Amino acid sequence: MKRLAIALLLLILLAGAGVAWTWLQRELSPITETEDAARDVAYTVESGDSFWRVAAELERDGVIRNARVARWYAQSEDMASKLKIGEYRLSTAWSTPEIFEALTEGRVETHAVVIPEGLRATEIAARLAEAGLADADRFLTLVFDPEAPARFGVEGPTLEGYLFPDTYRFARGLPEEQIIGAMVDEFLGVRNEIVAANPDFALSMREHATLASIVEKETGAAHERPLIAAVFLNRMKRGMKLQTDPTVIYGIEDFDGNLKRIHLEDETNPYNTYAIRGLPPGPIASAGRDALRAVAEPAETPYLFFVSKNDGTHIFAKTNAEHERNVDEYQRRRRRR
């Protein structure tokens, strides 16, 4: 009888353990049983959030079944102190362990932001701020910090021109320094690729980025970039002034859109390429891959001048006399009409 009683007790305990295990598995299982019936839930872990608070909110929002069981699970798996701050996109088709793996591994939701070619740092900062990805003032403070170029591995005077234009995906709450680092790294990667393909290329990083930014601002026509780059390189070789409006404009504080003769004669503007010889102190915008490549692989041409045809393209000339005729044809006569 004694052995029978012990056997019965063991059976009862095993049965109870089985029931408890089944219940526990149920409480950790997904809210919805199929992907088709699942719903996505946006959730943000903020600084200072406790695991218990997060679990309670997820239970309230119908993302997990049981906050207490979730807390027990997290403690048993040493996850309770490993929450990562950020935005998440969770699914009710995920089990509690899957949800908390996402929250502790930092699988945060990212947001796309498009940075077109030819933008200034101020315009890039505005785009990032509009997307809710950065504080514009903090971003620009870092970009224009005189020590930033050395810290990010580029040639100054600032990070203007080194924020590579591309489509990025960033998580909200990411420090501005990391965003800048990602953009500068893209620039370095693209430039290194171009330089490696052109071993005789002699311009320094700053000269390369600066001239490419001028090419980018001078034309939006892809086929013209190597020609525009060639014109400026030819002028530099001859010691001629570059005489390009975009650099002058960059150096004018609060430019109102009306470039005047007084601006072209202003010798106090370090970006006034009508007054200085050679390149300005640094880039005036972020050049894309094609503009950077055009500077390293310019067209073989004797052109020294170009003027806008007012249709987004330019007409090129070898001599000043030819250039003056083009200016008269496409600019002066047009103003008289």
Image (cartoon, helix red, strand yellow):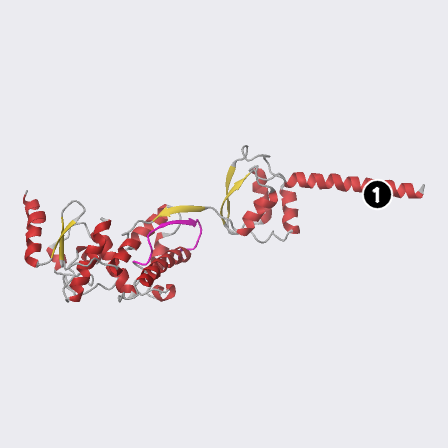
Q: How many marks?
A: 1
Q: Position of residue 28 (x, y in %)?
A: 64, 41
Q: Position of residue 276 (x, y in %)?
A: 16, 65
Amino acid type, mark 1: Leu
In the rendered structure, the answer to whether residue 218 lies left or right of residue 322 reads right
Depth order, front residue of 227/44: 227
Q: Is residue 238 magenta?
A: no
Dot 1, how many residues are within 10 Å of its Cα: few (below 14), some (14-19), or many (20+)? few
Depth order, front residue of 184/314: 314
Q: Residue at x 28, y 64 (%)?
A: 206
Q: Which image quarter is the C terminus in?
A: top left
In the rendered structure, the answer to whether residue 53 lies left or right of residue 22 reads left
Label 1 SS: helix
Q: Which residues are magenta?
A: 161-176
Q: Is residue 9 visible?
A: yes
Q: Is residue 174 magenta?
A: yes
Q: Which residue is mark 1?
A: 10
